[in-house]
Structure formats: C-alpha cells, structure tokens
Amino acid sequence: MADTLYDTDLIIIGGGPAGCAAARMAASVGMRSILIEPDRLCRNLYRIPALNNVLGGYTSGPELADSIVAELKSTELCRLELGRHVTALHADDDQVTAMVDASTRLTAPYAIVATGVGPLQPCDTTWITAPDGLILPPLWQAEADDAEGRTLLVLGGDRPIGTFLRANPTTDTRLLVAYPAADEYKIEEIREDPRVTLFPVEHLMLNCGEGASVSAEAVGQDGAQQTTTADAAYLSIGNAPTAPPGDLTRGADGYCPPTDQRSRIIVAGDLRSARFQRIMTALGSGSEAALRAYYAARELPAKG
Ligand SMILES: Cc1cc2nc3c(=O)[nH]c(=O)nc-3n(C[C@H](O)[C@H](O)[C@H](O)COP(=O)(O)OP(=O)(O)OC[C@H]3O[C@@H](n4cnc5c(N)ncnc54)[C@H](O)[C@@H]3O)c2cc1C
C-alpha cells in the first residue's frame, strides 16, 4: 500500500498497548508500519503484578505483555525500531515527518502518537523543593531488590504505592511516605501496612546525601519541622502526558485530545486524556487509530 514517496504507510510512536494494537490492526488491513519505542515493548505492563480488568484470561501484566510482544515480533508488516525515540513530529498537507533520535527522518501519510504518560517530577510540584534538574524514578519502577532491607522515602501518596506493596508482599522494607494534604484520601489503602510510615507534610526540602542516600527537611501539616534520612527516594506524585515536540495540539492540562489534532496525526492511548487510562481502552483506541489512517488513506468515510 505504501507510496514510494513515503518510508512507510504509518509511523507509530510508542510501543505500549496502544501502539502495539495499532501496528497489529494496520498489518491486518495490509498497511506497513514503523513502530518507534525507546524502551522495550509494553514496558509498563511488565510492572503490573495482577490484572482484573482485561479480557482474554490474562491475570498479570507480564503474561499479557509477553503475548503482545510475541505477536508484534511476528508481524512482518511492522518494522520495530526499539531503543530509539521520536524527537520531533511535523505534519503538513501531504505527509507527516518524524525525527528519530534527532538524526533519522521518516515520512508517512499518517502518524499515530501513543506515547502515554510519565511521572511528574519534584520540580512539577509546589510542595517539594529539590536540587535543580533532579530526576527521580517512580516507585512502581522499583524492584524488590531496590527495597529489600532498605528505607525508601516516597514523595507523594498516589495509588501506585499500594500496587508496589501488593507486588512485593514479603519484601522487608520501610516506606516513609511524605504526602501533602491533597493526597490524604489516596493513602487509605496503605495506612494499615506495617511497612509504611505516613508523613503528612506542608513542605519538604530534599537534599542529596552521601552516596546514594537522601535526606529531607520537612515542615509537617502541624507546622513542626523534622529532618529525615533514607536510602533512596522515589516518586508517587502522579503522571503527566509525554508527547514529542512538534505539531501536536495540547490542551491546558498537557494532554492531546484526538479531535484537536491535524488530520494526519492520530492520538491513541493514555496520551488522549487523564481519563480512560486503562489497558483495554489503550488497545481499543490504538486499533481504531490504525483504521482511521486506513480509511483516510483510501478517502473512504471513516464509518461502516
Ligand atoms: C503501576 C501501574 C499499574 C497499572 N495497572 C493497571 C491495571 O491493573 N489495569 C489497567 O487497565 N491499566 C493499568 N495501568 C494503566 C495502563 O498501564 C495504561 O493505561 C496503558 O499502559 C496505556 O497504554 P499506552 O500505550 O497508551 O501508553 P504506555 O503503556 O505508557 O506506552 C507509551 C510508550 O511510549 C513510549 N514513548 C514515550 N515517549 C516516546 C517518544 N518520544 N518516542 C517514542 N516512544 C515514546 C514509552 O517508552 C512507552 O513505552 C497501570 C499503570 C501503572 C503505571
């Protein structure tokens, strides 16, 4: 189907459930695609210990991820570009152009952007002061070995803390959870876990300690000041959309509503909105995005 003027029929940016579903659907209707992913395919799914909202009998994220990865690797019409990321995306009347690692230029009639969300950082909050440029990992990326026998300072009370504790039920760790008043309702599910020490704060100043350790000076919600130390710091303060720079239209919240985009750019998965961030919705929207490109390429109405 690809016109020789283009590198492929469809550029797919992001190899999560939405991007992978788009590639499978595109192949099923004869479209060639190039899928670009800086990490491994379905990296998020490998961190989800238990699933109860996905059809098909999958009960864990890794089980589903292994199945998707095997299918993608056997999809001949999809060229995987792993370990690379899109640094800019532009669209004009005739084509989309994606820059890969700021050096390789790819063109296609359509692009699907399915880059999902990434963790907010301390600099994105008003209640944490941290050294300039500090980037911390989210807690859900921590392995059991990162936590075993250690004290972790967790910034924020977002729900992945409960996921982490359930995923590591026998890990001997201590989580010092520093959270602002706005997160009070989120910490209910972890309140009774003996490995958790709750630390309601008004403000927290984070310092890099000796070696890999951290220390923090906190002002509690009762106004009392306290210094605390930990072996490492992790984030649980929520997510922000991670769209590549270029011709994507962002809303005030940073998300990229599909209906606001240029006609050759189709947004799928978590990047669409802070709502509907689930595996099944990502799979569905990625599949639908590929069919939109298919029908648009044939100048057929996108219905029926
Ligand atoms: C801890 C945790 C637990 C969860 N539990 C559940 C659950 O039980 N049930 C459920 O339904 N959902 C769950 N989710 C949500 C689910 O994982 C997401 O809704 C789903 O992964 C979204 O898929 P996506 O393809 O839109 O985005 P993602 O899975 O985030 O994939 C986006 C991909 O884009 C890549 N990317 C980013 N920037 C670029 C770039 N510039 N160029 C190229 N690639 C790029 C990223 O590396 C990433 O692999 C959970 C999420 C987390 C974090």
Image: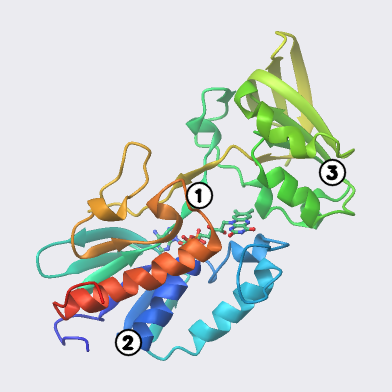
- Of all residues, the one furthest to the left in this rendering is 93
Give the x, y percent position of residue 101: 36, 64
Label 1 lies in ligand 1 vicinity (Cβ under 8 Å): yes
The residue lying toward the viewer, choosing from 240 and 153, is 240
Q: Is residue 210 visible?
A: no
Q: Residues within 10 Å of mark 3 (few under 14, many from 20)?
A: some
**Cα–Cα span, label 1 and label 3:** 25 Å
Residue drawn at x 56%, y 29% as measured from the top left: 131
Mark 1 or mark 3, whichever is nearer to me: 1
Residue projecting furthest to the top: 223
- The amino acid sitting under disc 1 is Gly
Question: In the image, 29: left or right of 116?
Answer: left
Placement of 77 over or under 206, stated as above or below? below
Asked if residue 260 shows in the view, the reply is yes
In the foreground, 101 or 60: 60
In the picture of the structure, the residue carrying the numbered disc 1 is 118
Q: Which mark is residue 83?
A: none
Percent x, y of residue 266: 29, 63
Q: Which mark is residue 29?
A: 2
Dot 1 and dot 3 residues touching (CB under 8 Å): no
Separation of residues labelled 1 and 2 (CA atoms)? 31 Å
Q: Which residue in the protein does label 3 denote?
A: 150
- Provide the secondary structure element on which disc 3 rests: loop
Which comes sooner in the sequence, label 1 or label 2? 2
Task: Write down the quadrant of residue 289 in the picture.
Answer: bottom left
Q: CA distance from mark 2 to mark 3?
A: 51 Å
Q: Residue at x 58, y 65 (%)?
A: 43
Q: Going 33% across and 50% down the picture, which residue do you hit?
A: 256
The residue lying toward the viewer, choosing from 193 and 232, is 193
Task: Give the secondary structure at mark 2.
Answer: loop
Disc 2 packing (10 Å; few <14; some 14–19; many ≥20): few
